[in-house]
Image (cartoon, rainbow, N blue to C red):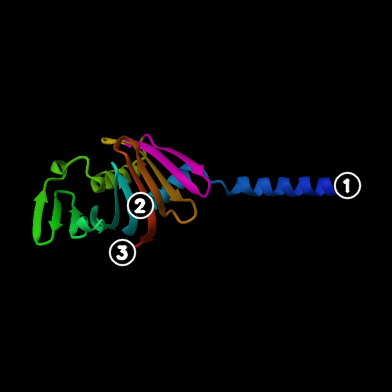
Amino acid sequence: MWKKTILAVLAALMVFCGCHAAERQDPAKMAEQARETLAKPFQTTAKVRYQGMETTMTIYKKPMNCAVVTFDAPDTLKEMKMTFYTDRVTLSYGEMKFDFEPDSVPGQAASKLILSALNAALNDQGMNIRQEGEGVRFEGSMEQGTFSLLLDRESGNLLQLSLPEHDLEMEVLNFSILQD
């Protein structure tokens, strides 16, 4: 009786392990799905810890590589809005509005680093991709340093971003793909 029970348990474990292994996807396929998600217009609210400062920001990535970043916290940044275009960055604060060349915005700005990492993740070159729990981890480098990006394996939604050289950690509170 015990032998049959042990065999049944072993058979169930083998079936479970086989099914679990079948669920694992090819890293190239996972990368393509994640890139498709990041290439679409999206909106996300995220907690960002950057060089000792904590903020909550909303990122709205529009088509044609345009992105808008607004700040929900702290109160001192609530009126700030940054719009990133391919040829300029517009910074609005209250009634003031300034345009800058993209490369003249301070390289340490958290929003610029985040957008640069998301754009770098769309590149096939030099990316290390692996499954991690329920997610897919992308590790790569860009001009400003290395980054690590975690996306949900099922939905492709952004979960977290880390840029260790800049002491920047972003935790996504919500993420939604926008209709074109």
Q: Nearer the viewer, mark 3 or mark 2?
A: 2
Give whichever of 73, 36 is nearer the camera.
Answer: 73
Marks 1 and 3: in contact by CB < 8 Å?
no
- In the depicted structure, whether residue 138 falls above or below residue 85: above
Instruction: Locate residue 147 relative to residue 3 in the image: left or right.
Output: left
Magenta segment includes 165: no
Give whichever of 91, 63 is nearer the camera.
Answer: 91
Write down the quadrant of residue 81 in the picture.
bottom left
Q: Residues within 10 Å of mark 2 (few under 14, many from 20)?
A: many
Residue at 82% over, 46% down? 7
Magenta span = 126-141
Q: Position of residue 133 (x, y in %)?
A: 53, 46
Marks 2 and 3: in contact by CB < 8 Å?
no
The residue under label 3 is 180
The kind of secondary structure element at disc 2 is: helix
Q: Nearer the viewer, mark 2 or mark 1?
A: 1
Q: What is the CA distance from the residue labelled 3 to the residue labelled 2?
A: 13 Å
Residue at 43% over, 49% down? 151
Q: Position of residue 52 (x, y in %)?
A: 29, 43
Residue at 14% over, 57% down? 92
Residue at 20% over, 40% down? 107
Q: Which mark is residue 70?
A: none
Q: What is the CA distance from the residue labelled 2 to the residue labelled 1?
A: 53 Å
The residue under label 1 is 2
The residue under label 2 is 38
Q: Nearer the viewer, mark 3 or mark 1?
A: 1
The kind of secondary structure element at disc 1 is: helix
